[in-house]
Image (tube, rainbow, N blue to C red):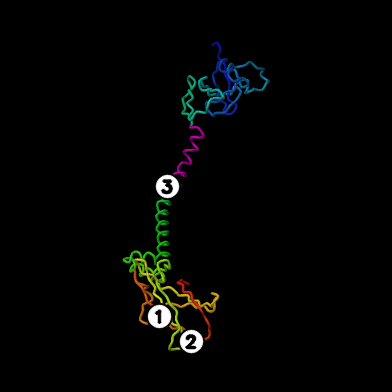
Amino acid sequence: MPDQLYTRCPSCRTVFRVTPAQLAVRDGQVRCGHCQSVFDGNAQRISLSPLQRPPEEPMDEDLLGPPTITLRNASDLRSAAEPVPTRAQPSASPGAPASPAPPSREIAYEERFSWARQHRRRRANAFYAFGIPLLLVLLAGQALFHFRDLVAARWPATRPALARACAVLGCVVQPLRDVAGLSIDASDLQADPAHRGLLVLTATLRNRASWPIAYPHLELTLTDAQDQVVVRRALQPREYLPPTSDITSGMAANGELPIRLFLDASATTQAGYRLYLFYP
């Protein structure tokens, strides 16, 4: 039969029936349809016709071909530039039993390790489904812990629940410390005419907020004629509140508190004063 040429893959020893036109493409560089190896089809050409040899000459397998070969059509031999097929579909030679082509190595690799990726993906999804809500709950709990006084002041109905939680956590719910919500409406410092060296401080504290605010500390500074500090003293709530006052409840919302204190200034000489509110 004219133009019947044969070439053999050097990797898997598969023989292909080819044509001169097919070997002329890309200088004979072809790809095996069985093992996907690239080889020179011209350099690997063989003849299937048996050769005469002297009895004493050893057999050359490259000249005579192997005793049993797998012959495939030229359509199974691809140009080296063509992409590797996902599955090889070689056709059997006439008279030879057909055998299914094995899956390509890339497909086998994907099938082999796809279960591991799916397992990791399921595990990551489970972590996100459980971890994100847990983190949100912890974040909300931490914010509630740090701002418990503000929450109790703005929403008084939450105070009992916050108090029970603090009993377990070892914290307390206190009146909100908000010095911006407080003001000194009026104050005066006068010498007591009945007692030499005794000063009388009067002031009115006002809570301008709509919720209770913790009682502040008072800072009283006595100054001289040049407005220089002579003496300064900080007064705690228990020093200026009436003895029956509940310090833990704080100053009532929109309430006011009159203050009257007697101070011993017999050891100092002062011409003025300053009064501030603060929290330590």
**Figure quadrant of residue 242:** bottom left
Seen from the viewer's position, the closer of residues 23 and 244 is 244
| Residue depth check, mark 2 versus mark 1: number of the one nearer the observer | 2
**Residue 135 location, quadrant:** bottom left
Circles 2 and 3, Cβ within 8 Å, touching? The answer is no
Q: Residue at x 40, y 73 (%)?
A: 186
Residue 36 lies, with reference to residue 27, above or below; the image says below
Count of picture labels: 3
The kind of residue on which mark 2 rests is Gly
- Within 10 angstroms of label 3, few (less than 14), some, or many (20 or more) residues? few
- The spot of residue 67 in percent (x, y) is 57, 23
Tag in front: 3 or 1: 1
Q: Residue at x 40, y 63 (%)?
A: 144
The answer to which of marks 3 and 1 sits earlier in the sequence is: 3
In what element is the residue under mark 2?
Answer: loop
The disc label shown at residue 122, or none: 3
The residues colored magenta run: 103-122
Looking at the rendered structure, which numbered label has been put on residue 197?
A: 2
Callout 1 secondary element = strand
**Residue occupied by mark 1:** 260
Question: Looking at the image, is mark 2 or mark 3 earlier in the sequence?
Answer: 3
In this orientation, does residue 173 appear? no
Disc 1 marks a residue whose amino acid type is Arg
Q: Secondary structure at mark 3?
A: helix
